[in-house]
Image (cartoon, helix red, strand yellow):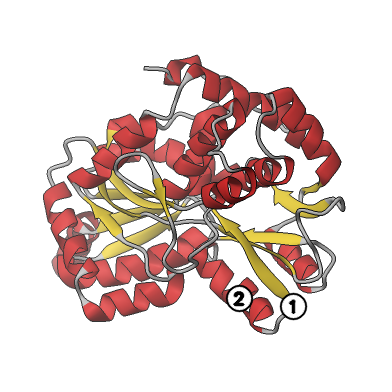
Amino acid sequence: MHKLIVLSMLLFSASAWADYTMIIPQKPGGGTSQWAQIVATELEKHLGEKIILKHIRGARDIPGFNKFHNDLRFNDKTIMVSNGGNGVSFLNEKVDYNYRDYDSVGLMNLNIITAVQKSHDPYSSEPTSFSGGGGKIPEGIAMTLLKCGSGLTTDEYIACFKKKVNWIKGMKGSERRLAFKRGELHGTRDNPAAFKKHVQPIIDKGQATLWFHHGILQSDGSHADDPNYPGILMEDLFYGANRVKPHSDLYKAYKLVKSFRDGLQKALWVNKGNPNRAKLVEALRKVANDPESVKKIQKKVGKYEWILGDKGNDHVKTLMTFITADALKTLVKFNKEAFGIKAIYKQELIK
């Protein structure tokens, strides 16, 4: 009997060791967590193996990604789920992780959508009240460019931001959404899944309207219109108002940060050279072509494309071309002087 118990435990341990582990850098229930749960469930069907979800929470979702980089990635059955906040932190915070050290399994090339109260004209002299949450978000830079126009220096844009934007820091997502619903904030922003759930119903009631989105990153480094929310690409709105394309130092910083945030908003990684990567990529390719899986994922986030395998690595290479000393310095300056938040200039990112 004792031998049977020991054998059973050994078999269980071997089975558990054989399972894949998907690292999620936030608590259960968050946006990335919900997305990962759906994707893991669908991925299991085509992978033929179990995927265990492991949440490693921490400030700004950094500790979980750091843990993957420093330790967990060396296990060939560990998959990392990263989000857009990780992309922003990579640019101007001290982190251990580095996208250059991993291979992409696949990522969803997503977007952020912004709306305003129907009663508010964001281009009027009235300041637009907006909650930045943690603060390091591209929406504040985008609305500065849209509200302040072309031809300004970064210092002039910062002065204009302080005059035309009422930037409210520290509100959690639930607080921000409730404040917008009550009309206490002029504007709000969300990822596609949260926008569908929290903002679209307010628009449908005629109480709010779309303002702008950041666009879908293309392989040539441009941004295309979002087919789910056509006609409000930030660059197109800017050109329509100013008859010139945005080209300032602040725009270059905006393009850098929005591209890292949205282009890496939901992504799956393994350590570079992981022998299981090809199997994972093929399973995810089947998910992306399975009508039932697609329906479940699109119900959550909308119709956005998957970028798989080597194309995901190429996507990262495109993002890296946006990193220049001037763009990084301008981004740090705007974070500190406009948003009033900490940011560091990372010379080591310049390659």
Q: Nearer the viewer, residue 335 or 68?
A: 335
Is residue 264 visible from the viewing direction of this image?
A: no
Is residue 181 visible from the viewing direction of this image?
A: yes
**Residue type for callout 1:** Gln
Q: Position of residue 102 (x, y in %)?
A: 28, 36
Q: Position of residue 22 (x, y in %)?
A: 34, 55
Q: Residue furthest front?
A: 243
Query: Of the numbered discs in the image, which one, if any, rests on residue 318?
Result: none
Q: Is residue 19 above or below residue 328?
A: below
Q: Is residue 277 above or below residue 36?
A: above
Q: Which residue is mark 1?
A: 207
Q: Residue furthest bottom?
A: 205
Q: Is residue 233 above or below residue 328?
A: below
Q: First in sequence, mark 1 or 2: give its number.
A: 2
Quarter of the N terminus within the rendering: bottom left
- Kindly state the secondary structure of the residue where label 2 is placed: helix
What is the spatial separation of the Cα atoms under label 1 and label 2, in whole angstroms?
10 Å
Give the residue at x 59% y 61%: 190
**Mark 1 and mark 2 residues within 8 Å of each other at the beta carbon:** no
Q: Nearer the viewer, residue 272 or 242?
A: 242
Q: Quadrant of residue 51?
A: bottom left
**Residue type for callout 2:** Gln
Quarter of the C terminus within the rendering: top left
Q: Nearer the viewer, residue 224 or 187?
A: 224
Query: Of the numbered discs in the image, which one, if any, rests on residue 200?
Result: 2
Instruction: Using residue 24 as the reference point, say whether residue 251 is left or right of it.
Output: right
Q: Quadrant of residue 317?
A: top left
Q: Quadrant of residue 340?
A: top right
Instruction: Using residue 72 as the reference point, say whether residue 229 is left or right of it.
Output: right
